[in-house]
Amino acid sequence: MGENIIPLVDERVAAPVPRIPATLAPPSGRVVDTLGRPLRDLRISVTDRCNFRCRYCMPKEVFDRHYRFLPHAELLSFEEITRLARLFVAHGVRKLRLTGGEPLLRKDVELLIGQLAALRTLDGQPLDVTLTTNGSVLARKARALREAGLQRVTVSLDALDDAIFRAMNDVDFPVGEVLRGIDTALHEGLAPVKVNMVVKRGTNDHEIVPMARFVRDRYGPRVALRFIEYMDVGATNGWRMDEVLPSAQVLQRLQAAFALEPLAAAAPGETAERWRYADGGGEIGLISSVTQAFCRDCNRARLSTEGKLFLCLFATRGHDLRALLRGGASDAELAAVIGDIWSARGDRYSELRGLQQAAPGPGQRRIEMHYIGG
Ligand code: SAM
Ligand code: SF4
Ligand code: SF4
């Protein structure tokens, strides 16, 4: 089947090489885009490969043995990633999140974490370095990650019911092993842990309350469970609006089972609307990317596995920073390019989707989640 699918190589090579500006303005730590949004958060995809085939992300009919993943030479090296991350930090980035694909499958990823954890903001503060993982090898890796300087982890877990979880990851992976990963992460001090559950109506929506109860009873405030609306990312998951369960309905179901109180946003640009259990049993979050756009505060940039800079999760095009890196650009030139790209940014896909104005143009195709990172 994979032979008949157009691989995503088209988009990968199509990214333009950014122009180096004639005057190289040094980074001020406060770059803003055309909508006044600062650059604060950089998500770095360290591999496009994954050992799961979640149907909403990498359906196995497409990502089968014929699918051409990036060869190693195409990936940014750890030194290249760290060099770029330092320049993003000079523009104001304070948070780095490693993602993928499955980031823990990238060989020696803890060495990269060590390099990133050593970076400092312009005013000398350590960065918030974190990682999103499917948890499959977390039990084995948690200690090395923490020793390398990782502070927290986010673990994706879509169901507690083993049969549903195995069907959703579509590689028959057992839920118990992911729970062991969460336990080990907490034991090693990678806390608080966030657990992300993508809700698909008709697939795992009846797991909402059991999942909340389980997390609350087993972990209390050490784990924050977040419910994510199933999104129309990429072009392969066959997304349909009727499979989205709006967060408002998730909240109704939770409120029927627990006494909840709203919490104020912890930081500007925060994606989750947070609620806490009235009895102090912890908190939950609702990420309503489909029904309630949060573009107005979006301060996130994404660096793909092969060094393309994307300004939106739903972008159809990246900016090829690797070509500049490998073409011998200086730090000053790269920093000026990054500043220029962010200054020109006007992306607000989810808001436009809400206004029914967000379809990709002719010949355009949205980039896949496993390549750009979540
Ligand atoms: N493999 C890691 C994992 O699953 O945590 C990291 C990469 S994954 C692309 C990052 C996050 O994106 C995960 O929490 C996953 O559930 C979420 N995700 C992927 N496809 C999605 C979709 N169509 N809608 C909503 N969330 C999605
Ligand atoms: Fe892999 Fe994460 Fe995508 Fe699932 S969501 S297929 S674990 S990259
Ligand atoms: Fe940010 Fe794009 Fe998501 Fe809007 S749609 S919140 S701009 S990533």
Image: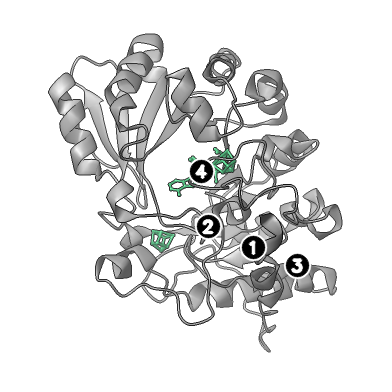
Along the horizontal axis of the image, is 155 left or right of 337?
left
Q: Which mark is residue 97?
A: none
Q: Which mark is residue 5?
A: 1
Give the CA distance from mark 1 to mark 4.
16 Å
Check disc 3: other Cα within 10 Å, few if <14, some if 14-19, many if 20+.
many
Which residue position is annotated with label 3?
Answer: 322
Q: Position of residue 287 (x, y in %)?
A: 33, 44
Give the CA distance from mark 2 to mark 3.
26 Å
Task: State the image quarter where residue 127 is shown.
Answer: top right
Whichever of callouts 1 and 4 sits on the residue coming sooner in the sequence is: 1
Which residue position is annotated with label 2?
Answer: 236
**Mark 2, mark 1: which one is toward the viewer?**
1
Which residue position is annotated with label 4?
Answer: 55
Residue type of the residue flagged with mark 3: Arg
Whichever of callouts 3 and 4 sits on the residue coming sooner in the sequence is: 4
Residue type of the residue flagged with mark 1: Ile
**Mark 1, mark 4: which one is toward the viewer?**
1
Check disc 4: other Cα within 10 Å, few if <14, some if 14-19, many if 20+.
some
**Mark 3, mark 1: which one is toward the viewer?**
1
Check disc 1: other Cα within 10 Å, few if <14, some if 14-19, many if 20+.
few
Q: Nearer the viewer, residue 53 or 300?
A: 53
